Image: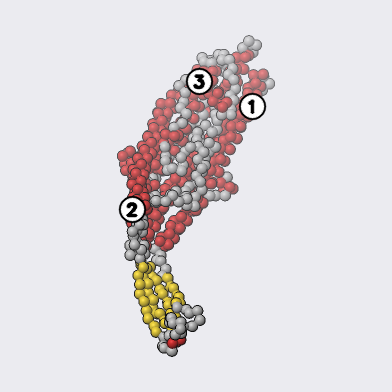
Amino acid sequence: MDIRRRPSAVAALLAAVALLSGPVWPARGQQDPSSQRQNPILEFPDLGPIRGSTEAPPLPGSLDPSMDLGGTGLNTPAVMGGKRRTGRLPRGGKQRAAASSLAANRGMQLPESLPAPAAAAMPGSAVTLTTIDVTIIDDPGPADGITLDEAIERMTRSNLDIRALRHELTQADADILTAGLRTNPLIYMDTQFIPYGTFDNAHPGGPTQYDVNVTMPMDLSKKRQARTTVARMARSTLEAQFQDVTRRQIDNVYRAFVTLQSARIDRLAAAATVERQTQRLADLRASPDRDKDHVEDAITHLELALERSRVTLGDANEAYEDAREGLGVLLSVSPDEAARLEPRGVLRDAGPPPPSLEEAESLALKCRPDLRAARLGVTRAGAELSLQRANRIDDVYLFYDPITIQDNSPFGSPSSKSWALGLTFALPIFNRNQGNIARAQSNIGQSKLEVSSLERRVLSEVRLADREFRRSLEAIEQIERSMLPRARSVLARRQTQFTAGEISVDDLEGAVEDMAEVTQSHRDAVVRHRRAMLELNTAVGLRLLP
């Protein structure tokens, strides 16, 4: 070999080896940027104050929802569809320096570009389209893995937060029982006219009297019935709020499951890269030209690339374990069982088209449990007003003395017996419960305004989720219709030109980078659309899409 041609040949060999080893990209690149480490999927749910209540009780049986570190607003039942519109789109040109900077920021340093001489054909250096797997996104997972439906069913049955909050409904039933209890009657016994010594003609008095009194409270304004109505309405409102907590927990399962699927795809892609590089390294080591300097340089270059790919694979494995951990917490499984969780199902889940925006908005107004709870809160506020009006009049106390004995024995006369009847009631002159009645009336107006505000928010959430769904679908269609075929065509043409020695290594490497980036963007778009499908379900409050 001419010594003057050697640098060019080595450069061509190193570039071809790097291309054959497959594109290396960060293992976490396909995941939603709001990953677990920055945006915990774990929510500490609570039912919150009962809608329509005039009081501000402490959150019943709840933990403080302060783990929303990523600012996702998990404590508020909102699905802001535009939040996750961060899928990276392919570059319009060959910005290799930017790609290297991006990889460096994500923990992987690409090798510096070598000078770009004319290509020299090398044995086994042809780049094939199989170096970039575009079908890995459709891998369904193991047959014995857990499906999304199974994860939801297990969460609703076993999630400890859901099980704890169910006790609030039991306690609400106890409140209904308490509200319906009547006031106990009173029994009073006394003795009157007890002399200091004895009664006689010099000290007349008496006779000594013995009484047994029974006092029965009488609820003439029907406060007990009004209390029972308020307690029943509180229970109905609490049940709707519990359903909304379940809806939000199901949304957490949605996100955790898609995160697990995405992490699994990243892991497969990183493992495939390591496998390709390992096989190529074995081929080079078995090459008959092993003793030549340019082959040794290629082996060294590939060994370094393989080490970087193994680091990337380690990061992908860690991300996968993190995703398992998150889903395991939601499903309330043991750490050992969480470490064995495998998702079953493809990210590109086919299903019927969603309803129109108008139909989705109408369904949300009918089906959202938080909106139903707010409307029940208005009814409960009306019941509170009736209760406060009933409280204007206190109980009337009926006094009945079945027997009064007057002891006439000191006077040598037989004792006498009698009975008595009386009535005690309050005069509503000063306190007619005016303040509580005014508060209850104001609470009705407040509750109605809250319903109107929540309706606007619900409709906004549906519009955002619908917009995100349709835009993410358009992005997939655009990539599959135009970008993927064009990238394949360019790579095939560049491969032919490189083999014929018509283009430089840099030109071929740029085509491979573009193909790898389009493929990764396609996976990102599929993950984004899958999230958008499930977010639309959460926004409407129904399982419209699979």
Cα separation, mark 1 vs mark 3, equals 26 Å
Q: Judge depth for marks 1 and 2 and give the one in front.
A: 2
Q: Is disc 3 placed on a helix, strand or loop?
A: loop
Is 2 drawn above or below residue 545 in the view shown?
above
Is 349 drawn above or below residue 122 in the view shown?
below
**Circle 2: residue type:** Gly
Q: At which x and y percent is residue 422?
A: 35, 72
Question: Foreground residue, 404 or 73?
Answer: 404
Q: At which x and y percent is residue 333?
A: 55, 49
The quadrant of the image that shows the C terminus is top left
Question: Foreground residue, 310 or 180?
Answer: 180
Cα separation, mark 3 vs mark 2, equals 65 Å
Q: Is disc 1 placed on a helix, strand or loop?
A: helix
Q: Residue at x 59, y 17 (%)?
A: 114
Q: At which x and y percent is residue 23?
A: 54, 27
Q: Residue at x 41, y 52 (%)?
A: 238
Question: Foreground residue, 535 or 407?
Answer: 407
Is 7 drawn above or below residue 400 in the view shown?
above
Q: In this rendering, would 295 be left or right of 536?
A: right
Q: Residue at x 46, y 24 (%)?
A: 487
Q: Residue at x 36, y 44 (%)?
A: 450
User: Disc 2 designates what residue?
Assistant: 382
Q: Judge depth for marks 3 and 2 and give the one in front.
A: 2
Q: What colour scheme governs how the chains and residues are painted in the rendered image of this protein?
A: secondary structure
The answer to which of marks 1 and 2 sits earlier in the sequence is: 1
User: Disc 3 designates what residue?
Assistant: 95
